Image (cartoon, helix red, strand yellow):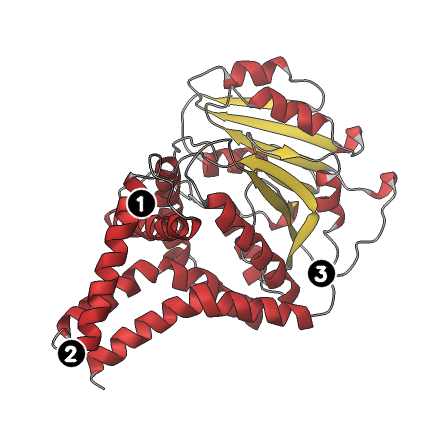
Amino acid sequence: MTGVAVLVWTCLALVAWAYVAYPVVVLALARLAPPPPVPARRDEASLPRAAVLVAAYNEERDIAARIENLLAQDYPPERLAILVGSDGSRDRTAAIAQGLAGPRVTVHAFEANRGKASVLNDLAAACDADVLVFTDANTHFRPDTVRALVVALDERTAAACGELLLTKPGAGSNEDHAYWGVERRLKRAESALGGLLGANGGVYAIRRECYVPLAPDTICDDFVIAMRIAAAGQGLRYVPEAVATEETPGDMSAEFHRRVRIGIGNYQSLFRHPQFLTGGSWALRFTYVSHKVLRWLTPHLLLVAFAGCLALAGEPLYLAMAAAMAAGALLATVVYHTRESLPWPRVLKAGSFFALLNVAFLVGFWRFAMGNYRGSWRRTER
């Protein structure tokens, strides 16, 4: 076997490991892990002071319901503060939030749109609570969500990630809700092994002293905040009892733009934070490389494998493999562009979503490499 052939099979094997074999292995290993500890019951007087931080940009549709939902949490009112930061919103977000301000709700109406990371830095600096709870303006908590997050922070756990449920709109072609269902199962399994990766941005909490200010252009703030804690060995775990819901975008075109931005944030994390590859437990390093790094590199691996097959096209096997890859890419493109007009089978929609995800990552990598991004955000439904 030539060196090019070895390269082709290595690239394909790494992709197969990340998307097929790894989920099977990690779910099987999680079955052998001891059950997670049950948080000790806490009386009202022993609950720490918590602050919920909400960074919002052009969220006039949701901000009032978000604040009211947080005010209705089953948590001692005198121990729960709500801080809302409007990041230069051009709609009525700040005005609506200020209309609900009071002893428990503080609103910071920032004039400039600087980005979520800068807002979180300012909100965290503006409070002295023992626990910081992070959420988004379009997220909805169950009544006991904040309490479940807070009580999970014990002597072995400095950060707790809740369970985010995505609701699908009545119509739409986006398959993110199905993909997320698999991701939730993997998060539970990885947490059981001590290798949970990051947090769900709409529902997680950390000890106040563990917060390290973010670089202003940080995009995947939830991943960076939680992974810093995990890589430092301070303890990160999944708390399925802390439930939140969000609505996923209805169409794949909206999802594509969201995934490009996430892709930029992924490569930021990979190259700016080498400690994520070397710190923490063996389980964390294993899950990080298998679940995150290899998936972020999947478009690059597939392009190298395709180029290798073309180089070996004189052999029937590699010619057929190159043809299959090209046909798969063409079919995914056709499914994407006819997703609203033709009733494609679910498996082909899933394949198109996989292709869209990797094209978005490739675009995100290019924009990261060229420095073509900012910390300020473009609003999406999720």
* First along the sequence among labels 1 and 2: 2
Looking at the picture, how far across and down is residue 121, in whole percent? 52, 38
Task: Name the one closer to the observer, 276 or 257.
Answer: 257
Report the amino acid beneath label 3: Arg
Tell me what residue is drawn at x 75 percent, y 41 percent: 147
Q: CA distance from mark 1 to mark 3?
A: 47 Å
Residue designated by label 2? 315
Q: Is residue 352 left or right of residue 163?
A: left
Looking at the picture, how far across and down is residue 70, in whole percent? 68, 29
Task: Name the one closer to the observer, 289 or 112.
Answer: 289
Q: Is residue 277 visible?
A: no
Residue lying furthest bottom: 1
Mark number for residue 305? none
Q: Is residue 352 left or right of residue 249?
A: left
Q: Quadrant of the image for the N terminus?
A: bottom left
Q: Residues within 10 Å of mark 3 (few under 14, many from 20)?
A: few
Above or below, 158 relative to 45: below
Residue 281's quadrant in the figure?
A: bottom right
Q: CA distance from mark 3 to mark 2?
A: 56 Å
Report the amino acid beneath label 2: Glu
Q: Secondary structure at mark 3?
A: loop
Q: Is residue 342 left or right of residue 279?
A: left
Q: Are marks 1 and 2 in contact (CB under 8 Å)?
A: no
Residue designated by label 3? 156
Above or below, 230 relative to 252: below
Q: Secondary structure at mark 2?
A: loop
Tell me what residue is drawn at x 49 percent, y 50 percent: 179
Tell me what residue is drawn at x 64 percent, y 59 percent: 235
Above or below, 48 relative to 240: above
Residue mark closest to the camera, 3 vs 2: 2
Looking at the picture, how far across and down is residue 360, in whole percent? 32, 47
Residue designated by label 1? 335
